[in-house]
Image (cartoon, grey):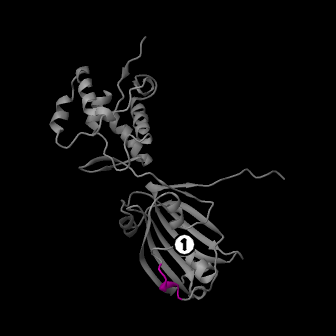
């Protein structure tokens, strides 16, 4: 028995001036496929047999999800682009709104798209990838990836070390430390909130330097002769505080990655303790692993 196939080409998002036209197409039969093609224009993806939806063992919502994911990965819609409405996608695929919503829900969970109430569904920014096995500055990493880094210094002061901070830095509790909080931005989007602690006695006059437009690691190396060559970091999912969510421009219900890093110099001495809150929707970390040799 021949399998039933459904056209999987995806329409462009309707211009705001044509909601009535879109509504007029709902519920029509195959006659309006040509009209959909006309609305799509030359930007429509090609209708290859492998892209067609097939009524069979693979759920329709998953087929819609896969088709949309291919379009996003292939650059059909770029970061910030608005997707067609659920109604338009349902029309085009010939499936119910429930099916479309379930497919979109999967993409939202993956961080591929996001919804804005009253405005529509948009393609998310691509995740910023960082290598966990390398101890490099945010400024250097973003420059390598072709992103324009920017730093906003929120606070910088000398304060007494708390017992937990002192323990991480290997100093006596209460000794003065530099407390430097910075919001790190790539392009126009805040990516992470970074809070650095350094023993004051090691870096006299540090706060007189520009900590906004240049790398802190560069200052430590060139001005004070201290190079951070190794470290230990822990990563765990968390929910942001109200302040953290506001600074990162995200909802409090959206998870973040909480990274704690202790950096050491060549002698193995702890020099820096850094607590970083990373926007979860934009974070992607890599680490190389190897199977240990058998003894």
Q: Is residue 206 magenta?
A: yes
Q: Quadrant of the N terminus?
A: top left
**Residue 158 visible in the shown view:** yes
Image position, residue 216 (x, y; %) = 53, 75
**Residue stretch rendered in magenta on the structure:** 205-210
Question: Is residue 59 positioned above or below 198 on the image?
Answer: above
Residue furthest right in the image:
295
Residue pictured at 41% horizontal, 43% vertical:
107
Q: Is residue 39 magenta?
A: no
Question: Is residue 50 positioned above or below 11 on the image?
Answer: above
Image position, residue 200 (x, y; %) = 56, 86
> Residue 9 versus residue 259: which sits nearer the camera?
9
Q: Quadrant of residue 282?
A: bottom left
Residue pictured at 22% horizontal, 41% vertical:
15
> Residue 114 versus residue 211: which sits nearer the camera?
211
Which residue does the numbered mark 1 point to in the structure image? 274
**Residue 95 visible in the shown view:** no
82 left or right, relative to 248: left
Question: Is residue 272 positioned above or below 250 on the image?
Answer: below
> Residue 53 versus residue 126: which sits nearer the camera?
126
Image position, residue 287 (x, y; %) = 62, 55
Residue furthest left in the image:
20
> Residue 231 versus residue 139: which sits nearer the camera?
139
| SS at mark 1 in the image | strand
């Amino acid at each position: 028995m021949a399998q039933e196939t459904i056209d999987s080409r995806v329409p462009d998002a309707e211009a705001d001036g044509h909601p009535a036209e879109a509504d007029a197409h709902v519920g029509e039969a195959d006659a309006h496929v040509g009209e959909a093609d006309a609305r799509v224009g030359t930007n429509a993806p090609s209708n290859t047999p492998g892209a067609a939806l097939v009524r069979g063992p693979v759920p329709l919502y998953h087929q819609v999800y896969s088709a949309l994911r291919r379009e996003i990965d292939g650059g059909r819609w770029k970061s910030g682009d608005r997707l067609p409405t659920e109604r338009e996608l349902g029309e085009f695929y010939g499936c119910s709104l429930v099916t479309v919503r379930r497919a979109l829900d999967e993409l939202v969970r993956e961080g591929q798209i996001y919804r804005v109430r009253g405005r529509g569904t948009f393609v998310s920014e691509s995740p910023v990838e960082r290598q966990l096995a390398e101890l490099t500055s945010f400024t250097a990493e973003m420059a390598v990836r072709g992103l324009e880094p920017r730093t906003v210094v929120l606070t910088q002061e000398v304060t007494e070390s708390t017992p937990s901070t002192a323990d991480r830095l290997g100093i006596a509790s209460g000794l003065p430390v530099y407390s430097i909080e910075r919001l790190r931005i790539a392009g126009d989007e805040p990516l992470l909130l970074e809070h650095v602690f350094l023993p004051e006695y090691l870096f006299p006059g540090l706060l007189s330097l520009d900590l906004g437009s240049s790398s802190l690691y560069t200052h430590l190396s060139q001005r004070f002769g201290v190079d951070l060559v190794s470290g230990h970091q822990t990563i765990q999912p968390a929910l942001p505080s109200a302040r953290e969510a506001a600074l990162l421009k995200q909802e409090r219900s959206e998870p973040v990655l909480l990274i704690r890093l202790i950096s050491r110099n060549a002698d193995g001495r702890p020099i820096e303790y850094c607590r970083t809150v990373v926007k979860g929707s934009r974070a992607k970390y890599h680490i190389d692993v190897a199977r240990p040799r058998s003894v």
